Image (cartoon, rainbow, N blue to C red):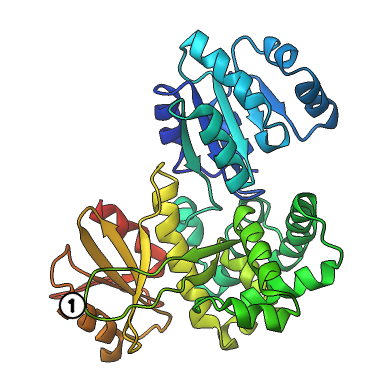
Amino acid sequence: MTIIPRTAAPYLRKFSGQYPVVTITGPRQSGKTTLCRMVFADKKYVSLENLDTRRFAQEDPRGFLAGLPDGAILDEIQQAPELLSYIQTIVDEEQRPGLFILTGSQQFEVTSAVNQSLAGRTAIIKLLPLSMDELDDRLTDTGVDQLLLKGFYPRIWKDDLDPVQALAAYLETYVERDIRKLINIKDLVLLQRFVTLCAGRIGQLLNFSNLAADAGVSHQTARNWLTLLEASFILFRLPPYAANIAKRLVKSPKLYFYDVGLAAHLLGLESVNHVSRDPLRGNLFENLVIMEALKFRLHRGKRSNLHFYRDSNGNEVDLLLSLGPDLYPVEIKAGMTINRDYFKGLDHFGKNFPHGQGRALVYGGDEEQQRSTTSVSPAISFHRLLARLT
């Protein structure tokens, strides 16, 4: 089994030399533990998923941490958040960089607890599933539709698992279990229906009222469940761009999945042929590209700089990258052949926002082009364009 190198590795090493604590959050099975144990191979590893270990940490936090004089990797810290205030005392006394490495798979819960107890003492990196940059030569014979079906969870790639079976197990083992731990859901079938309905709205403006009505739950329940699915790194809300200009801009976010394969699975797609014929293929492709842009930022320890643009007349650009004071618009098209209509949204945006570093079209073909006003990039090499921008 070959370990796939992760972009975040050198940033973890760098941050561990600057901060006493480094915190890595991300979805279940995104590779957090593997990455930490590889980068910090000499550090003691402690899993708080282990019931006896967790009980010790919860009941006697001082005694537990006293047994870790050189710090440790503490895996799934959300299982024992009370440790954080004791860790604060230790790192303030020790003044040693890289003492504790924390991981967690509940982003709001972990981030809130860490920010409360370790503000100024920790760097935070979010580790999502694999990026196309990280997969690199493994993608040589992989078509776009296969990527949409397979998704990017590391084990599927490392162990060559059947994505249909693996993603079904992932939903049942991790997503449903974690959410049921957070809230008391009496009817799991309703939650499953809700998540599936979210997949059917991929790349669309979020309408809570319609989503709640279709799921057969209250407006507030829909909001709560969506928040939980975001906290578990399942759903991602892409915010609209808001600017002080005369045109009215939409205020609703768009809905995407952190892993496009999980969305394809929820849509019932079981083969490349299914993907190629699905009416939401373009939306899945858009999800793929937007997640690449997000991974490029998060895996380097940066915050998301992603938005989309849409005004009340329906003029739209799929993705806006905020680069300092500049905006870089990216249009996303699943088609393999470029046509003039692909540039309409970019042209309209350029009239309202004439300044910036250029613009891009990311599409389903395989040829890179540098046109007079637009960088044209295949999705599979989008990361190269992002690297040039930074």
Q: In this view of the protein, which residue sits in the foreground, 198 or 313?
A: 313
Instruction: Classify 10 Å Cα crowding around label 1: few (below 14), some (14-19), many (20 and above).
Output: few
Residue 293 placement (x, y as % from top left): 40, 59
Residue 92 lies, in percent from the top left, at 49, 14
Question: Is residue 251 left or right of 231 when viewed as pictured?
Answer: left
Residue 299 higher or lower than 368, as above or below: above
Residue behind mark 1: 352
Q: Nearer the viewer, residue 68 or 272?
A: 68
Picture mark count? 1
Residue drawn at the location 27% of the way across and 68% of the way down: 243
Is residue 382 visible to the viewer in this orientation of the structure?
yes
- At x 17%, y 62%, the residue is 357
Residue at 36% x, 58% y is: 383
Q: Secondary structure at mark 1?
A: helix
Residue 166 lies left or right of residue 315; in this view the side is right
> Does 97 sit above or below residue 117?
above
Could you tell me the amino acid type at mark 1? Answer: Asn
State the image quarter where residue 233 is shown: bottom right
Where is residue 300 drawn, in percent x and y?
Answer: 40, 43
Vertical placement of 215 versus 157: above or below? below
Camera sees residue 34? no
The residue under the point 30% across, 81% down is 248
Q: Residue 353: where, in percent of width, then height?
A: 18, 72
The quadrant of the image that shows the N terminus is top right
